[in-house]
């Protein structure tokens, strides 16, 4: 299906437009997660306090989660930006987003207003839980969009051996 606009002697198709939009969305999602990881990676003790205030994880997992989560976000974000192992990075980030939404949803039901710890561990950073839930919903929608429409050759995945071929 063509959009009808001529460009460089050919038509820009809806399929091509979706691929370009998916590429831009993939890179944007990667940048968002890289940015979200930085303050948490630099200040794991403060991030552990934020995790504690959610009152969901058992105490022995809080420090482990505070130390590992930022590096998972950073790694997956970089993989998305580079277009390398996109499906794996998207799967991990999708699971994280669903987990975040459940944790926020539980605290909305409890009536707890807390610092989500999404982009900063600063104690002065407070945001409305519903707005955080909606933002995470948009990020989840972006992840699904990229998963289904990012089939471009723009990324390091094109240099990997095809499935079933080992070196």
Image (cartoon, rainbow, N blue to C red):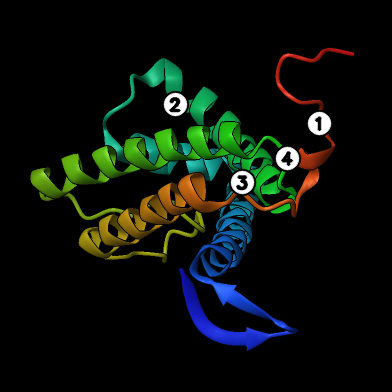
**Residue at image location 71% in from the left, 47% down from the top:** 83
Q: Are marks 2 and 1 in contact (CB under 8 Å)?
A: no
Residue under label 4: 84
Number of numbered markers: 4
Q: Which mark is residue 100?
A: none
Work out whether mark 2 precedes mark 4 in sequence or the reverse, and give the earlier one: 2
Is residue 86 shown above or below 81? above
Q: CA distance from mark 3 to mark 4?
A: 28 Å
**Residue at image location 73% in from the left, 40% down from the top:** 84
Residue under label 1: 160
Dot 4 falls on a residue whose secondary structure is: loop
**Residue at image location 52% in from the left, 62% down from the top:** 15
Task: Determine crowd level at label 4: few under 14, some 14-19, many 20+ residues with C-alpha closer than 10 A.
Answer: some
Is 93 placed left or right of 136 in the picture? right
Dot 1 falls on a residue whose secondary structure is: loop
Residue 146 appears at what percent x and percent y? 51, 51
Q: Are marks 3 and 1 in contact (CB under 8 Å)?
A: no
| Quarter of the figure with the C terminus | top right
Mark toward the viewer: 2 or 1: 1
Residue under label 2: 62
Q: CA distance from mark 3 to mark 1?
A: 35 Å
Is 20 placed left or right of 102 in the picture? right
Q: Are marks 3 and 2 in contact (CB under 8 Å)?
A: no
Residue under label 3: 43
Q: CA distance from mark 4 to mark 1?
A: 9 Å
Is residue 30 shown above or below 47? below
Q: Are marks 4 and 1 in contact (CB under 8 Å)?
A: yes
Picture quadrant where residue 115 is located:
bottom left
């Amino acid at each position: 299906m063509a959009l009808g606009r001529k460009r460089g002697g050919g038509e820009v198709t809806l399929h091509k437009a979706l691929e370009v939009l998916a590429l831009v969305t993939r890179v944007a999602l990667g940048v968002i997660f890289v940015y979200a990881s930085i303050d948490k990676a630099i200040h794991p003790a403060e991030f552990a306090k934020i995790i504690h205030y959610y009152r969901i994880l058992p105490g022995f997992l809080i420090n482990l989660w505070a130390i590992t989560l930022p590096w998972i976000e950073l790694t997956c974000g970089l993989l998305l930006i580079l277009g390398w192992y996109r499906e794996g990075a998207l799967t991990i980030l999708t699971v994280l987003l669903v987990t975040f939404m459940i944790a926020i949803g539980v605290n909305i039901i409890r009536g707890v207003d807390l610092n989500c710890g999404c982009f900063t561990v600063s104690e002065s950073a407070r945001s409305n839980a519903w707005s955080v839930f909606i933002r995470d919903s948009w990020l989840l929608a972006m992840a699904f969009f990229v998963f289904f429409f990012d089939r471009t050759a723009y990324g390091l995945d094109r240099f990997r051996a095809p499935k079933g071929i080992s070196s």
